[in-house]
Image: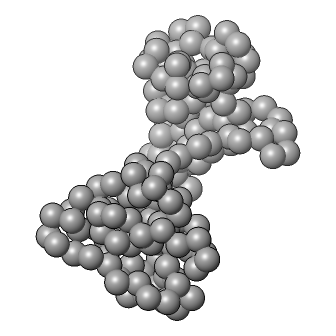
Amino acid sequence: MGSMSQHTGLRGCQMINNHSCFLCLSTEDIHQCDKCGKVFSCKQHLKTHISGNGTCYPYRVQYDCEMGRYLVAARNIKQGEIILHEDPLVLGPYTRSKPQCLNCFKLINPKHRFDCPGCEFPVCDEACANGRYHQDECEVLKSVGFKASIEDVDEFDQQYSAVTVLR
């Protein structure tokens, strides 16, 4: 399908028609999705419309002069269907936190406590002490000689305040 044109609406705002890229709204070199037929895409974003399991994502971006860009459903969405997955920029404990594992973030069970050998923050077990979320701050804390001293796992502890900031 060839490119479609934009036209100027009220107050000079660029109105974009439905035959534009579902993500960037470009009207240059637009193609209709061969799988679902409900979404148009530029060459750059064609693969972005297909999820890791090979299904088409059920949304597209639209533009309104007053609201800006927003997502709309491109097809019926099933209840409970995951339509977007995004990893957090930073993952860590709240600044006023009861002691929790710095890898899996479960609250520490006082009966099954395990302290990380590197920084002495309580974690679930050796696997969490070596886990991907905890390793970086553990190395930094170890390098400056910091050792956590968490005595009561049922009370808030200010030592957790710096962990998310450090990450």
Q: Nearer the viewer, residue 72 or 131?
A: 131
Above or below residue 125? Residue 155 is: below
Q: Nearer the viewer, residue 86 or 148?
A: 148
Estimate the x, y position of residue 160 in percent, counting from the top left.
39, 78
Q: Residue at x 85, y 45 (%)?
A: 79
Estimate the x, y position of residue 121 in percent, counting from the top left.
38, 72
Above or below residue 109? Residue 6 is: above
Above or below residue 125? Residue 122 is: below
Q: Nearer the viewer, residue 44 or 4?
A: 44
Q: Residue at x 63, y 14 (%)?
A: 32
Badge count: 0
Estimate the x, y position of residue 112 in percent, counting from the top left.
59, 71
Can residue 10 be seen? no
Estimate the x, y position of residue 40 in percent, counting from the top left.
60, 21
Q: Residue at x 83, y 35 (%)?
A: 76
Q: Residue at x 70, y 13 (%)?
A: 35
